[in-house]
Amino acid sequence: MNETRTVAAVDLGAESGRVAAVSFDGSALTLEVAHRFSHGPRERGGVLRWDLDTLNRGVRDGLAVLDAGADPIISVGVDTWGVDYALRTADGGLVDEPTCYRDPRQLDGMAAAVKEVGAAGLYLATGVQLIPINTIFGLVSDVREHPHRLAAAHGLLMMPDLFHHLLSGAVTSEYTIASTTGALDMSTGRWATGLLEQLGVPTRLLPEVVEPGTELGPLRGEHTGALRGCRVIVPAAHDTASAVVAAPLRAPGSIFISSGTWSLVGVETDRPWITEDARAANLTNEGGYAGTIRLLSNVMGLWLLQECRRQWAAEGHVDEGRELSYPRIAELAAAEPGLVSLVDPDFTGFLAPGDMPGRIRDYCARSGQPVPAGIGAVARCVIDSLALGYRRVIESVVAITGGAPPAVHIVGGGSGHTLLCQLTADATGLPVYAGPVEATALGNAAVQLAALGELAGLTDIRAVVSASARTAEYIPRPGQDWASAAERLAELIRAETTSRSQRCVTEESQ
């Protein structure tokens, strides 16, 4: 009989965090969440920053719950969202609180980098898509607008690396999270020092890059219970990388969608695709577990609904005296006709926090579409647009790789959104398999267990996850003309791109 082994998975998303105990009995994984907490960025000193105190307290509280438990915890690992970073001082402190990728300074940093190096130069040096949230654009903003930050810094730590440092004292950068920066050469797996030097970013700040599964040492602190003797093992520290580890892909070439605040849509490959065609399609190459590459694109994701829900709550919209739940919003959306109004989910005007329903209505009005009035109509516009956004990325991936995907696998929080899953099947014409919801925490734990010798690698991990978690199946339905809707969305994006280019030319001439 196999002895049950338990590890701790700390999973920090851009809206909430969780600390879970994941046990493996030799055939299946069992996940029990010890602690959940909410968090978010807030403005300080005119800059949108992460509340590090809340994050750190949430992690510590979760570990304290585990320490008080009965089952020994062998190891702990942390995954987080990508791109954001902290600057470490020589004495082990931080220069300031980490800035958030949604801060407008990222847009200015991207514009400056493109002017200096060119869009093609950035892509060919890294293989990473041109998107304002990339770490490198925050660093360029630091160079140009906040040089005191870099002058005071002794080193740079991505968000999961920061927590691994706090837990173990180690100073490293895990490969999958480093691959989200736009500062790592995906063809070599090394920092793109030539590009960074050209942009004025001091390369002395860059830590050693380590592979997922690397052990960093013992867990710091006084632990008298289940955490006594616990080790810190780096998982696939980018939350998407961990989610894809646990995606029970049924066949090679299957499309994955890691659906949460962001939706990351792509395919797992054995090499990076750094070509002009991939650049034109704005596809990114991100590092995965066990030597894999994820060729994908970011779609704005459930952030749109999260911000809508926040605004509706602020306006006093309730359901039976309580704040509107996501299932209730989906129910209202399902009652509305589909494909009436569409938005580009990746429109930069949707990136920052604020009145998202108002921005969506403004977008529809400017583009000559019916303006969604009620909650259900706005939500249906978002969900239809996300499904079409997924279709658009899948078509780009197929065009680049030449593959014919047999199915779509949705993991993460969005896998529980039945309307979005069904509309994704309808929009793509592919069967959709949804689940597990907790894929990120499961993938995080599975990499730790593999490092401990309990699992044999990626194939074994996915077989165990398949045996451990249920998935729901959605079959494409006939009826609505998704091809025409996809062309409508493409025309909206072309018109917005043209308008933006004209504004830039006008501003430069003034």
Image (cartoon, rainbow, N blue to C red):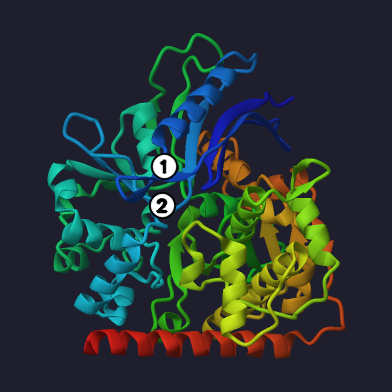
Task: Point out the residue furthest to the top here.
Answer: 224
Q: Is residue 357 above or below residue 211?
A: below
Along the horizontal axis of the image, is 457 left or right of 435? left
* Residue 28 location, quadrant: top right
Residue 60 in view here: yes
Residue at 50 percent across and 73 percent down: it is: 347
Instruction: Provide the residue designation for mark 2.
Output: 177
Q: Amino acid at mark 1?
A: Pro
Element at label 1:
helix
Report x, y in % for residue 208.
27, 46
Q: Residue furthest front?
A: 315
Q: Quadrant of the C terminus?
A: bottom left
Residue identifier under label 1: 160
Image marks 1 and 2: residues in contact by CB distance under 8 Å: yes
Question: Looking at the picture, does residue 183 appear above or below residue 149?
Answer: below
- Residue at position x 77%, y 64% in the image: 376
